Image (spheres, helix red, strand yellow):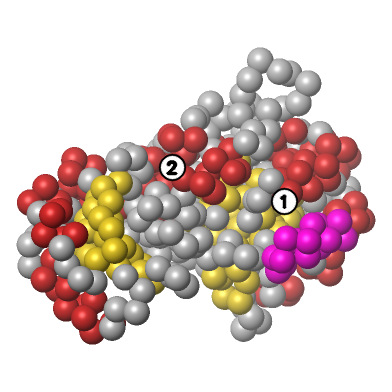
Amino acid sequence: MIDEPARVLYTQGIMVIAIKKGTPPEEMRAFADILEQQGVTVHISEGASQTILGLIGDTSRIDEERLRAQRLVEKVIRVQAPYKRAHRQFHPEDTRIAIAGPDGGTKYIGGGFLGIIAGPCSVESRDQIIGIASAVKQAGAGFLRGGAFKPRTSPYSFQGLGEEGLDLLLAAKKETGLPIVSELMDISHIDAFDEVDIIQIGARNMQNFTLLKELGQRRKPILLKRGLASTIKELLMAAEYLIAGGNEHIILCERGIRTFEDFTRNTLDLSAVPALKRESHLPVIVDPSHASGLAWMVPALAKAAVAAGADGVMIEVHNNPETARCDGEQSITPEEFAGLMTALRKYAACEGRSL
């Protein structure tokens, strides 16, 4: 269940208070305590150049004029957008998602780091997933993706190996040290994903609000894909469901939307990248494989995504696309992925970002 302050968030909104630079921490904390005595919850966001107090709850009883009169207050803002805590006003600094690897290292997405997620559409066998994992790690990928439970348009198509597929992903994680990303389709499978590092919510489940509420209670990173016919606002509102439950570890993913164009599988909306980065503090990645459905188009779209400001890309890589059990036509080979990584390193270096 979402707690009451989070529920009130949608009816009353959020008030943001920018604190003057140089304010002693103890004075700011004392101010926050006074505010909480008025029935709101105070979320403190400390950035490099600005500290923000986000007031969550029934802010209608807060006197804005009295707030502005306080010597430590620089300005007071009411967040008008329906996605309150996902909005950049609430959290001016870019959110950085940190994922600890089994080898003791830490991988990052966002906040100056470019996250590269690569792997097959679906896990098919132990040799397949470990072989691809080793290849993409050697090329420079930071995360391994692989589907164990697969949502397919046709009921006769390969649906994935289920929990066996998760076990094989975990074996690849142990072998290579790469954190793993896999799609959760049903709330009943949540416990099986305990050792999955990033849970992917696919386009078909973006507005599965029951599932989002449950994942909001967890503190595991969530990769939230945009629905195939969803607006940017709807994507951010889906993210808001997760944040309202307390989970702020969210990665937004643009994976193409459905338009009248049928040359590609979907139409990659690259304009969503700067739009989302302007509206929200959450990291944004792009999936050019699902967006285009065409392997030969993936490298160009991946480079365009990074140039547009994306915090990462998710690429389908298969050791033998012609024999892949699903989506072989949009999968590139490990050799092609290695060539793409050479280009992406240059793009990242030009923008001062780390892989």
Q: Is residue 347 magenta?
A: yes
If the image is split into quadrants, where does the C terminus sit?
Answer: bottom right
Q: Position of residue 168 (x, y in %)?
A: 67, 62
- Start-end of magenta stretch: 342-355
Read off the residue under disc 1: 306
Residue 93: in magenta span: no
**332 horizontally vs 124: left or right:** right
Q: Which mark is residue 236?
A: 2
266 lies left or right of 28: right
Nearest the viewer among 120 and 7 is 7
Mark 1 or 2, nearer chain start: 2
Q: Is residue 288 above or below residue 52?
A: above
Q: Is residue 242 visible?
A: no
Q: Can you say whether 139 is above or below 295 in the image?
A: below
Relative to 2, say whether 234 is above or below: above
Residue 233 in the image: x percent, y percent?
44, 35
Q: Secondary structure at mark 2?
A: helix
Label 1 Cα neighbours within 10 Å, binned few <14 / some 14-19 / many ≥20: many
Check the image and name the residue furthest to the top: 260
